[in-house]
Amino acid sequence: MVKKMFSRILVTWSDGQVGEELQRSNQDDNIEYLFLTQSDLNVSAKRKTEDIVKEFKPDLIINLATFSDILSAEQNFAEAYSINVLGVRNLVSICEKYDIALLHISDTYVFKGDKDAAYIETDPVNPKTVYGKTLALAENLIQKKLKNYVILRTSWLYSNFSNNFFTKFLVKSQYTSELTVNDEQLSSPTSTKELCRAIDRIITKGITEENAGVYHFTGLGITSMSLFAEEVFTAAKIPMIVIPVLAGDAGIIIEEPFFLYLSSLKFISEFGYTPQHWKNALIEMIETSAIVPIKPGYNVTWDNEEYFISSIDWAKRIVTISTSKDNFLQLKFEELVNKIK
C-alpha cells in the first residue's frame, strides 16, 4: 500500500499543553493545520464536530482532547466518560465515515502498574482508576473500528504551559524552601517537546494499515516524582529541599498504579526517533523557560534600575518585578533573558 501522506490536519483541544507545544513546533509548510481549542470544539458534540470536519476536510485528526485530572475523574465519572469515551466514539465514527486517519494520545494509566519490567504494547490493559478505565475504553473503540490509526501512549507529560506537575513545582518554590513529594510511583517524565517530535515523525511517515496500532513513547530512564522534583530545582538553580514521602503523606487519596514505565522500542523501530533521557529533556525544557534561576526576592536589573522579583505566574509565563509597592512592572519571561543576577 502506498504511504498515506497528510496535507490537512485537524487538532482537537489545541489549548492544552501538547497543543500549545505543537503550535510552536516546526511544522511542514505543505501541511495546513486547523487548531481547535476546547471552546472551539466539544468532541462530545458529534453534529458540530462532523460539521467542522466536513468543512475543513482533514486527512488526519490529532486528538488531544482528554479529561486528565485523575482525582477529579473519580468524582466526576460522567464528565470524564463524556470526553474520554463519547468524544472518541464520535471521532472514530467521523474518521470511519470520511476515511480520515486518527492519531490519538493515550496514557500509561491503562495499565495496573504492578509489572516488574517495562510495559510493552501487547501487555493486557487493566486500569485501576476511572481515568485509566475511560482511556482503555477509548482505545478499544479505536482498535475495533478504524484501520488507519495510531494510539500513542505516553507518561508523566509536562511542559512550560498550563498546570502540570513541573509548573506546580516551580510555583510552590515561590512560597517555601521545602517540598514533600511522592516517592512511591515510578515512571518516566515526558516533555511535550519530545512528544511533539514523536508526533512529527508519525506525520512525516504517515499512517497506513501496515503500521497502524498502539505505540509507546516516553522519556528514557525511570525515576520517582520526588527525584524528578529534585532534578527540576537543581537544573533550574532554585534552592529547594525535596522530602520524599509515601503517597498518602503526599496527599494522594486514591490508589494509583505504582510502576508506569513504558518501552518505546516499537516506536523507535517504526518511526525512527529515539527519545532523549528524561534528564536531558528536562534541561532542554528549563533552558527554553528563558529565565532561571527565578524566585521571589531575587534581584534583577531592568533599564539600568534595580528591581526585585515579587511574583511569578509560571502558567502565563509572566514575572512581576518591583522597586516598591507602588512601582512594579509585569514582564514576559523572554524579556528577562540574561537579566537575573
Image: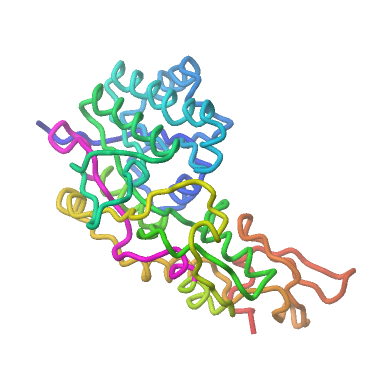
* Residue 328 rendering spot, x and y as whole percentages: 82, 68
The quarter of the displayed image where residue 276 is located = bottom left
Residue shown at the point (43%, 40%) measured from the top left? 129
Residue 236 within the magenta-colored segment of the rendering: no
Residue shown at the point (47%, 27%) measured from the top left? 81
* Residue 323 rendering spot, x and y as whole percentages: 83, 76
* Residue 254 rendering spot, x and y as whole percentages: 50, 46
The quarter of the displayed image where residue 242 is located = bottom right
In this view, the residue in front, 251 or 263, is 251
Residue shown at the point (55%, 34%) measured from the top left? 38
Residue shown at the point (39%, 41%) measured from the top left? 128
Quadrant occupied by the N terminus: top left
In this view, the residue in front, 137 or 5, is 137
Say whether residue 333 is left or right of residue 147.
Answer: right
Say whether residue 110 is left or right of residue 303.
Answer: left
In this view, the residue in front, 127 or 280, is 127
In this view, which residue lies farthest toward the right? 326
Say whether residue 268 is left or right of residue 137.
Answer: left
Quadrant occupied by the C terminus: bottom right
Task: Give above or below for 260 relative to 84.
Answer: below
* Residues shaded magenta: 204-229
The quarter of the displayed image where residue 238 is located = bottom right
Task: Give above or below for 301 relative to 36.
Answer: below
Task: Give above or below for 233 relative to 137.
Answer: below
- The type of colouring in the image is rainbow
* Residue 46 rendering spot, x and y as whole percentages: 46, 17
The total of numbered circles placed on residues is 0
Residue 211 within the magenta-colored segment of the rendering: yes
Task: Give above or below for 134 relative to 160.
Answer: above
Say whether residue 235 is left or right of residue 144.
Answer: right
